[in-house]
Image (tube, rainbow, N blue to C red):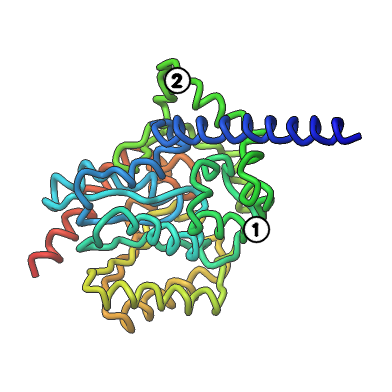
Amino acid sequence: MKKFLLRLFLFIVLVNAILFAVKLGTDYFLHKSTDPLFSSWNEIQHLKKSPELLVIGNSKAATHYNPALMDSVTGLISYNLGMDGLTSIQQEERYKYYRQFNNKPKVFLLNMENVMYYYRDDIIQPQQYLPFLDDTLISDQCLSMGMNPLRIYTPQFRYFEADICFETAFKQIVGLPDNEQFRRNKGFLGISPDFNEEAYKKLVDSKPAALINIELMLRHERFLKSLTNDGIKVIMVFPPQYSDYSNHIQELGVLRAYFRNLSMRLGVEYWDYTESDISDNKSNFFDHHHMNLEASNRYSLEISKRIKNMMIK
């Protein structure tokens, strides 16, 4: 019996050692990956110069603000922290993560949205977070969004059923190229798929509504106030979105009025493009609220000119 227990113990130790080795090796290669799924976290750890102009928000931010063009107009070093589905809380936490590796920006452009004030109970592309779960800022957020605690507290099982992670690590090992179609440039993701009319009709038929949560709004206001207290120029921008879609959003007028009031209380800029010429033209969009690459570039130049003029005053 003693021999059996000893062998069982040694077997468990050996298996755990192998799993830990796999975890550490996968972590190592994913931290070097330029794959779009992981580069949005990797790159901000190794920026040569801290950006002076920082953009943050959900996927609209990621696809609407081209830092390469913004740099050329504003004369500032800019970077886009936008990511799919970021709520107001996640935007705050992503900025905190960014600040662990970079100095504060001079200008903070916050992409406002009618679906930002809510508690997310699911995780978009959860495998992107796995190499970074040793950072409590990320692991705490993942826990709040429903990630299995075993992935966090038992690192040897972190990559269980994580095929994308192993595929990406293998590409890094053998030198295979990453997916170029969705390669980010300074955080910017410029894409131009076709407009899906059927999906759009289903969306407007669902009677979308602006999300209003007083608790989260107050928390977000405290976050923005902390930025202004830190000497950062804050710009709140409600970017273009297809005007027909805006017309279908219940309580959108209430939320836009709140944004205007918030900007006045904080003493910061608020620029609303929901009724702009860009919003009126469906050819500028590949879905209800994401602009295609051509329109995003034109918008980036326009917004950059306003930022430059603001900085001159």
In this view, 9 is above or below 300: above
Residue to which mark 1 is pinned: 121
Tell me residue 47's x, y (percent). 26, 44
Residue to which mark 2 is pinned: 173
Tell me residue 78's x, y (percent). 23, 50
**Residue type for callout 1:** Asp
Tell me residue 279's x, y (percent). 38, 53
Q: Nearer the viewer, residue 142 or 225?
A: 142
Tell me residue 297's x, y (percent). 27, 42
Name the residue: 44% across, 15% down. Answer: 174
Can residue 203 be seen here? The reply is: yes
- Within 10 Å of disc 1 (Cα), the crowding (few <14, some 14-19, many 20+) is few
- Within 10 Å of disc 2 (Cα), the crowding (few <14, some 14-19, many 20+) is few
Residue 248 appears in which quarter of the rendering?
bottom right
Q: Is residue 222 left or right of residue 109?
A: right
Dot 1 falls on a residue whose secondary structure is: loop
Residue mark closest to the camera, 1 vs 2: 2
Name the residue: 46% across, 39% down. Answer: 286
Dot 2 falls on a residue whose secondary structure is: helix
Q: Nearer the viewer, residue 161 or 91?
A: 161
Q: Is residue 178 left or right of residue 186?
A: right
Q: Quadrant of the C terminus?
A: bottom left
